[in-house]
Image (cartoon, helix red, strand yellow):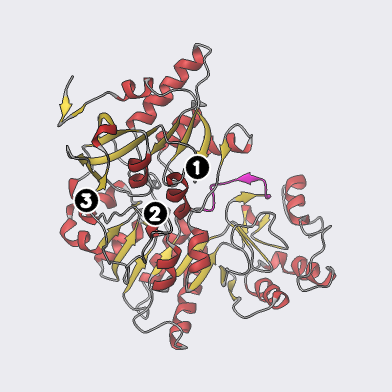
Amino acid sequence: MSMYGPFPVLSAEEVASGIQHGQTVSFSGFSPAGAAKAVPEALAAHARAQHALGKPFKIRVMTGASSGHSIDEDLASAEAISWRAPYQTGKALRKQINAQQVEYVDMHLSHLPQMVAWGFLGEVDLAVIEATDITPDGRVYLSTSIGASPTYLKYAKKVVVELNRRQSPRLAEMADIIVMPPPPHRNPIPIMDPLTRIGCPYAVVDPAKVMGIVENDAPDTVQNFDEPDAICETIGSHVTAFLLKEMACGRIPKSFLPLQAGVGNLANGVMAAIGSTPEIPNFLMYSEVFQDSLVDLMEQERLLGASATSLTVTTEKLKRIVDHIDFFGPRIVLRPQEISNHPGVIRRLGVIAINTALEVDIYGNVNSSHLFGTDIMNGIGGSGEFTRNSYLSIFITPSIAKGGKISCVVPFCPHIDNNEHSVQVVVTEQGLADLRGLGPLQRARKLIDHCAHPAYQDILNRYVKESRNGHIRHDLLKCFELHRNLLEKGTMLPEGS
């Protein structure tokens, strides 16, 4: 048997064959960045082989957030997942969750490490963690994400390290890792600036728990973003105009405030719009993901520095970062998700949060995760932590979808992830609604007038007018009428509209 220092080198198939039906396995990865790859692929094949023999085989799966294709697609397609937390984006897995074939726990991402540490989610039988190196005394140098990997390394009963030869060892120069002690023995987190470093460039594992090393050289499977379309550009222009107005009013300092942006084409495009607005000062970010548009902004020195928990960038952009690590290394800090999404740090730094909504209702409640209030799309992710605790919380969404068959401004969201008490600003291509200081009826008027598509404004105004009077006006018989129309007729628009 070959060895890597004191650790045996195993094949992914050897590891997979030792995993038992019903066990809990945690994988590295926050988005596809830094996700375990070889073992979950082998585990999917092992599951299919067990099923072919008529034997049950499903495991409980945890990651940092969403994960790579080999976890949320390959494992799900092999029907090898019985339970999943804390977030996902796989099409196959989503279908199984909505069919109640997989139990899914959708969580605030900063809560996960403490839930694992205290055993609320059960024991972790095995952690499979991608790294660029592990030392004989148990220092683990992670790759393109930190996520929850330090927690899994500490609390899992057994550990396998996937050494990814494709990933640069110099990625460790960005890592700043601490594992929070249990309450009530926690000191204030001394992060006074997005680039403050308070930890080590490596995670730690007890060497006695390491079963072995699996070697691979597979890339992260981060998808390319679409070029911003007209709707995205218009939303971006509304956001930048609002930020400039807030600066002119003295509510944002001339030195500006750190930004956070969610994952996806729309958020990526809005960040590009902010970066291309010269009146906005050069800025910092305190966020959870570092996306493609930020590479360009950092090279242009518009983005001065960024704190995140993952490099969720395409292969081309990652190569640019690694090839110019002397430039990018001091400007990017990668932290555990318990720190990147920590409410206290977000509040202290005065973060301006920009996240994407599936839909928003006329009173400012936001649905980020479910269709019709029943079918999961992805999950709440980090939007709740940033929305609740930021200096400014902004939600962006197109006003309509599916060619106008869906209104993204509705009378009442059938599922609410971020409620009216936390959502401050809503932006569509139609305009911007600043909801701060407004009562429910005033919020409704502003959202309908400024954010709803013209095809739906009369419908929404009529709903408010005809609803039962109260602090919040609602008609419990009609509040989901648009959603019922969509289910029954394929469009939210009522007949004759």
Mark linked to residue 85? 1
Q: Residues within 10 Å of mark 1 (few under 14, many from 20)?
A: many
Q: Residue at x 39, y 72 (%)?
A: 349
- Give the prevailing secondary structure in the magenta stretch: loop
Q: Residue furthest front?
A: 184
Closer to us: 99 or 339: 339
Q: Residue at x 26, y 45 (%)?
A: 204
Q: Residues within 10 Å of mark 2 (few under 14, many from 20)?
A: many
Say if 372 sits above or below 62 in the image.
below
Q: Is residue 37 visible?
A: yes
Q: Quadrant of residue 135?
A: top left
Identify the amino acid type marked 2.
Gln
Identify the amino acid type marked 1.
Ala
The residue beneath circle 2 is: 337
Sequence-first disc among 2 and 3? 3
Q: Check contact, mark 2 vs mark 1: CB within 8 A.
A: no
Q: Read off the magenta span.
A: 372-380
The residue beneath circle 3 is: 172
Residue 424 shown left or right of residue 206 in the figure: right
Say if 155 sits above or below 74 in the image.
below
Q: In x, y percent, where is residue 434?
A: 58, 77
Q: How many marks?
A: 3
Residue 53 highlighted magenta (yes or no): no
Q: Residue at x 82, y 63 (%)?
A: 475
Q: Quadrant of residue 429?
A: bottom right
